[in-house]
Amino acid sequence: MREEVLRELNKLAESISYKLQRMEDLISKNNIKEEEIPLFRFPRKVIREAHKYKEEIKFIDDEIIKSNIAYTWMVTDVYRWLITRTDIDFAAKSLLIKQWIIATASIIEAIVTYIASQITKREIKSVNTAVKILFQSNIIKEEDMKALKDIWGQRNKIHIGNIKEKEYAKYSENDYLKAIQTLQTLINRLNKVHYKG
């Protein structure tokens, strides 16, 4: 059964790849304008619904922050699909992974600064300060603090003019897996504290 499904998937991938390339060839050879190009249907259920993400972060009471986190999370579903379902490679794939990490780091930023602000009863904007407060409050462990700071350091490479090395093929699947695991660990720790009351 599994082998049959894999064979069908291979045939579908080959057919879809051919048709997409055919579309691009027709567009470029005939100078078709952007507004004239018919859109193909992006697969449904790839992008999870916002309310499902909100359920994971019940420790955030601010509905605006919670919603914006959910919307950013939805974008990471698009990055995941492009990276795992297409043969984009080298620089483009690497920098797509970077964008995924940046989006994940933005979610982390929103969470840790919100929680740190709740703890201290004052506005905390610095991620590193927020992470330290969570550590000192026994919400996260030392290894979590290091992982969160590492992800934030990667996020700060959004400023291209400050980067002193070429980013060609610099980011890999391991980098985004680490970012996802770091975010999930943070959420698990916060949910544990939240449900303890």
Image: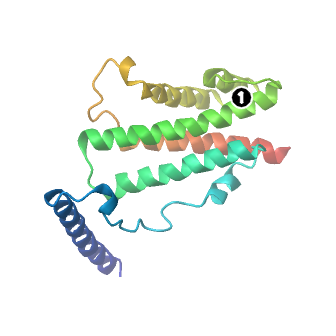
Q: Residue 81 location, x and y as percent?
A: 40, 56
User: Would residue 26 be found to the left or right of residue 113 on screen?
Assistant: left
Give the residue displayed 45% in from the left and 44% down from the top.
177
Q: Residue 123 location, x and y as percent?
A: 75, 24
The quadrant in which residue 25 appears is bottom left
Give the residue displayed 39% in from the left and 18% down from the top.
162
Vertical placement of 48 versus 107: above or below?
below
**Which residue was labeled with disc 1?**
134
Locate the N terminus by quadrant. Answer: bottom left
Give the residue displayed 36% in from the left and 65% down from the top.
39
Residue 175 visible in the snapshot: no
Q: Secondary structure at mark 1?
A: helix
Residue 73 visible in the snapshot: yes
Q: Residue 165 location, x and y as percent?
A: 30, 21
User: Would residue 124 be found to the left or right of residue 185 on screen?
Assistant: right
Locate the C terminus by quadrant. Answer: top right
71 vs 189, nearest the viewer: 71
User: Which kind of residue does numbered mark 1 sit on?
Assistant: Leu
The quadrant in which residue 142 appears is top right
